[in-house]
Each structure stands twice: as structure tokens, then as C-alpha cells.
Image (spheres, grey):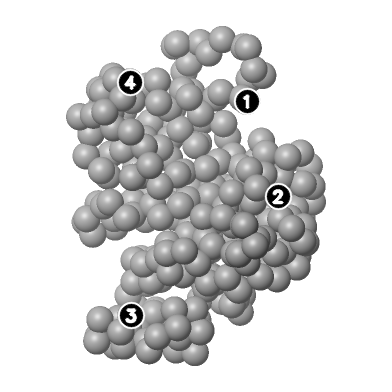
Amino acid sequence: MENKNLPAIEINNLSFSFQDQLVLDNINLTIRNKEFIGIIGPNGGGKTTLLKILLGLLKPNKGEVKIFGKSPAKNLKYLGYVPQYSNFDKSYPISVHDVVLMGMLGRTGFGTPLKKENPKVAEVLEKVELTPIINKQIGELSGGQLQRVLIARALISNPNILLLDEPTASIDSKSGKSFYDLLQSLNDDMTIVLVSHDIGAISRFVKKIACLNKTLIYHDSKEISVEMIEATYHCPVDLIAHGVPHRVLDESEHSH
């Protein structure tokens, strides 16, 4: 990589509108290399739009984004993307091996045929602990397994930054726990940005938390204050926590 001392992601004065509707308003965020940040906020708050801008799929109306010091288009090779599980068509007849191999498309140069027996597929499936199901059809997988397949697909191109969109929306808490263990081990080698509307699910595992609902609130820490939550969700915190007081930062619970 060119310069690991540069921030992995820099967002400066970024605004984005869609059909005259302001979706993101003056976003500023710096994410250092090998950071693990959770971006929480309500559905419709702009989280997926922000990911699409980082991926170069949308262009901001104002401001700029840099990936390791360059525009997303120039440094796309550093990004791995895990889309929302629910957007993936499980009825499509394709094997786990071939879904993972799809992650190489565009990395090898368009028109370059993908080698069916790419050894990297087995390597990344081992990393996500799915080696035994390499030849299974994706329609046979559980939600948790499919989630890991989509991570393997993102990992096959050796990204330095992994972007995940609502990754645990479809997973029960047991598989969610081991899923976060996987993310924590991947974080040793890469920056992870995870967006979610589920505060409780991510708050115990990430290193930093930002709140996004059109505007971004971020204090470069894991602290979430009542004021941050209420400003983001526009409703009293006890409603968000379903009436249960929500502790985010219990170190004894967070330690391994």
C-alpha cells in the first residue's frame, strides 16, 4: 500500500441531495487505518448513501471523499463491500465457490476470464470458517452462512477497508456473536466500517461509534451520550432501548 500513515477514509464537508431532498448534510469524518467504526442511525438516515459515495457509486453535490489520500475511483482496489444480506437473491442457482469468485470481477481487468479453480477461494472460505460448504448451492445456506459467504466475496480481492451494510439484520444473536468475533479478527489487518440501525448489536464490539441521520455526530470515541442518540433518532432514548436502560460502555462485558 502506498502510505499506511494516511487516513483510510477522509470525508470533508460532504453533502448529497437526491431529487432536491437533502440526504447528507455537511458530513466530516476521518477514519484511521485499522480503525473499527460503527455508524448507527435510523433507516432512511443516509447510511447506505454514504457507503455508495465511499464506493464511488454516487458523487457528492459538495465536499470530497478520499480513500488513502485519493478519490474513491482511483483507490477502489482498497475497498471490500458487503451488501445487505436481504438484497442478495438466494434463489439464484450458484455455488458458494462461484459467489466468492465473483469478488474477483473487475479486479483482474474486464474481459479476463476467471479461473474456476482459483486457490484464493478456498483460502478466504477458510478465513470465514466455511471450507466444508464450498460446493453447496447458496439456496441451502442459513442466513449466517450466507453473510459469511458475502464477506469472503469481499475479502478475495485483499481489501484494506471493509464496508458492511446492516450485516446482522438477518442473524440471530448466537451467530451474531461469532460473526463479530470474525470481524474483530479481520480488524487486525484492515479498517472496518459497519453501518447499522441496531445500536445494541454493534456497540459492544466496535472501537468507535458515529451517529448519522442526515448530519453526523462523532466524538472519535466509543461514548454514546443520550444527547447524541436523541439528536440522531429524534425521540427519547428510552423508546429506542424499548424501555430498558442501555449501557454501552461496560468494559468488563467488552473484555475478552
Residue at (33% x, 54% y) in the render: 168
Work out how far the residue at label 4 is from the one at label 3, CA to CA, in angstroms: 39 Å
Numbered disc 4: secondary structure = loop
Instruction: Identify the disc placed on residue 107.
Output: 1
* Image position of 128 with respect to 21: above or below: above
The answer for how far apart the CA atoms under marks 2 and 1 are is: 22 Å
Q: Amino acid at mark 3?
A: Ile
Which amino acid, mark 1? Arg
Please indicate whether residue 43 sits to the left or right of residue 159 in the image: left
Q: Give the mark nearest the N terminus, 4 or 3.
A: 4
Assess disc 1: are there few (<14), some (14-19) or many (≥20) residues with their C-alpha within 10 Å of its C-alpha.
Answer: few
Residue 166 shows in this picture: yes
The quarter of the displayed image where residue 93 is located: top left
Please state which amino acid type lies under the numbered disc 2.
Lys
Callout 1 secondary element: loop
**Mark 2 vs 1, N-terminal side:** 2
Q: At x 43% / y 35%, what residue is drawn? A: 152
Mark closest to the chain's N terminus, 1 or 4: 4
Q: Which mark is residue 240?
A: 3
In the rendered image, the vertical position of residue 230 relative to residue 100, given as above or below? below
Q: Hey, which quadrant is residue 1 in on the image? A: top right
Q: Residue at x 46, y 70 (%)?
A: 41
Q: Are marks 3 and 2 in contact (CB under 8 Å)?
A: no
Residue position for label 4: 94
Which is more toward the observer, 227 or 63?
63
Q: Is residue 165 above or below residue 129?
A: below
Q: Nearer the viewer, mark 1 or mark 4?
A: 4
